[in-house]
Amino acid sequence: MNWWDAGDYEIARQILQRGVAAIYLIAFLSALDQFPALLGQHGLLPVPSFVSRISFRQSPSLFHWRYSDRMLRGLSIGACLIAATLVAGLPQLGPPWLPLLLFLTLWVVYLSIVNVGQTFYSFGWESLHCEAGFIVAFLGSNAVAPPLVIIFFLRWLVFRLEFGAGLIKLRGGREWRDLSALYYHHETQPMPNPVSWFVHHLPRWMHRGEVLGNHFAQLVVPLFLFAPQPVASVAAAIVILTQLWLVVTGNFAWLNWITIVLAFSAVDDGAFRVLIPGLHDARITSPTPIWFVVVVLAVTAWLIVLSYRPLRNLFARHQLMNASFNRYHLVNAYGAFGTVTTERFEIIVEGSAAETPGAGDWLEYEFRGKPGSPQRMPRQFAPYHLRLDWLMWFLALGARDGRWFEMFLVRLLEGDRPTLRLLRVNPFPETPPRWVRARVFLYRFSTRIERTQTKAWWVRVEVDALVDAVSLAQVRR
């Protein structure tokens, strides 16, 4: 291997390109399903209103030129088709400019969505997705060896992702330092899955071990991603295994899956040959076109310049979490769960068709993923991202931007079908309710005894009213 040729990373390149493309496919399917209702022309936070206030320079997006739900769907469908061909590996059979062009197309379209997505697209993994899609574009095709500089920049991305998350925990809540964070996290995380209840009830010494393992995986292991082989492959394996544990125990959209994919940038073909005896050497020996070398080196130099602020942020006293330092969501700062809440609050939205509703006249709206009925087992949705459910979690924590929720209640009173399709259960399928309200409940996982006796996964107690009963006439005043 020379300064340019990372030929012993051909398998890693296939995983990186196809894996990132697969997550783009999921992200665009999510946009097709949810974007019009959340951000469309008649959405909760309409894009046309946003672009009338924010300039292209502030937030670059194709939708500054024009927005319509039809245009959004057309771009998303086209992007899904491109992503599917990349997952199948078809463009990679051509010249290096072909996958480069297609990945950059995906990046431009998804960046256009993220930059007008407002609070519904404010998650750290949106920036991670943009950055990953941009970088893997320069891995080339099967006709040339993977560029070593891009392989190492992908490791730098994983380093920022993991090491940044580790530092933000040490600087965050005391629960990460006294090893008690996992006493609560499985219960209070945004969207528990079917395994979360069982893991929550593990002995506390195991939860302390989880925290220690997390600190090791995020603060020590990332340093070895840049070590010679086979050390780098071992470090990547530890990252992959810890991320798989998070996949098994929670719903974090595609955050864990894209981290797993990116970690393969540190796994060389030799490691795969150890695991799979008889695997042939896939090294590329044909020369790389000079134009491709120049383009990759120029882009790498630009990305290195952009790395200054994220690097400085890692060691800043007031470290930023999930921050983008440029409009293109490239070379970002990452981190998650700097603090862990010890109690879980849920907002329950109800409607009533009665003219003067009494206590028994209210029916509950059920969301797809967030906890609602105590009898309903938590579901697995990741890597799919339920954006409305996630924002309901932040709202229960006291998020200040509640404009979307006010409009959400209006849409329920109007019986708006696109909005109702985002829910699991609409208790008013024929005509919309006269009234809606929102109550705050304290939730906790049932104990083993309670689960045996009642079959309930949750126990809940009402603690407050978020929105008192309102009618459509009242909210339109």
Image (cartoon, rainbow, N blue to C red):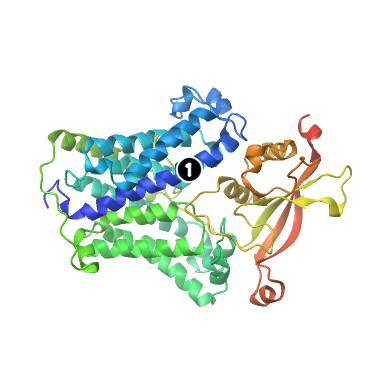
Q: Position of residue 253 (x, y in %)?
A: 48, 52
Residue shown at 34% from the left, 47% from the top? 87
* Residue 204: image location, x then y, percent: 54, 75
- Estimate the x, y position of residue 163 in percent, counting from the top left: 37, 56
The residue singled out by tag 1 in the image is: 29
Determine the residue positioned at 37% across, 43% down.
84
69 in relation to 352, above or below: above
Q: Position of residue 392 (x, y in %)?
A: 62, 48
159 left or right, relative to 299? right
Label 1 is placed on what type of residue? Leu
Answer with left or right where residue 206 lies relative to residue 399.
Answer: left
Quick check: can you spot residue 159?
no
* Nearer to the camera, 331 or 276: 276
**Does residue 269 appear anywhere in the picture?**
yes
Quadrant hosting residue 407: top right
234 left or right of 309 in image = left
- Label 1 SS: helix
**Which residue lies at the image location 29% right of the left edge and 63% below the top edge?**
235
Residue at point 78%, 29% (across, down)? 477
